[in-house]
Amino acid sequence: MARMRIEFDGFEKFLEEIERQEKDIKPAVNKALEKTFDVVQSGVEQTIPPHHRSGATEDSMYKTPVVEWTGNVAEVKVGFNLSENVTSQFLIYGAKASITGVPYRPPDMKLWNAIFGSAVTKRIEEIQRNVFEEILK
């Protein structure tokens, strides 16, 4: 599981302008994070099929965006629900050989990139910026 937030260059200026125009920022934040969820989960869904065994890992994928607010901080969980299945962590980060007999497994870089890669990060920044530009029109 990863938590995504609103993060792009110039975000503070958007906040100042939204405040100056006395607009409610929460709908824009919710929309931006929901779109962020869609981008990440789409990539995860495309990269997970080669790992299908029991279906448990696929079943642990987050299906719908839930934006959680803690004070002035909003986040959306993406990827996999670790309380349901931890296998995704071994797929994303790999597994080192251990004395317990777990064999070495390299990380699946396609899956890792779907969540943390620079291309998806740039796409998320673009989407978030567009959402905030819309609210200021």
Image (tube, helix red, strand yellow):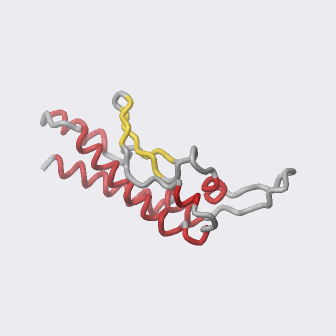
Q: Position of residue 47 (x, y in %)?
A: 53, 68
Q: Who is closer to the viewer here, 120 or 10?
A: 120
Q: Position of residue 18 (x, y in %)?
A: 19, 38
- Image quarter for residue 91? bottom right
As drawn, which residue projects farthest toward the top?
71
As drawn, which residue projects farthest toward the front?
54
Residue at 44% from the left image edge and 59% from the top image edge: 41
Examine the rendered structure and indicate whether residue 4 appears above or below residue 96: above
Q: Position of residue 66 (x, y in %)?
A: 37, 45
Residue at 55% from the left image edge and 70% from the top image edge: 49
- Image quarter for residue 75? top left
As drawn, which residue projects farthest toward the right?
99
* Apparent side of residue 43 relative to residue 69 in the rendered image (left or right): right
Q: Position of residue 108 (x, y in %)?
A: 62, 64
Examine the rendered structure and indicate whether residue 29 appears above or below residue 108: above
Q: Who is closer to the viewer here, 117 or 66?
A: 66
Q: How many marks?
A: 0
As drawn, which residue projects farthest toward the bottom?
50
Q: Who is closer to the viewer here, 104 or 61?
A: 61
- Image quarter for residue 7? top left
Residue at 22% from the left image edge and 36% from the top image edge: 16
Residue at 45% from the left image edge and 46% from the top image edge: 77
Examine the rendered structure and indicate whether residue 41 appears above or below residue 136: below
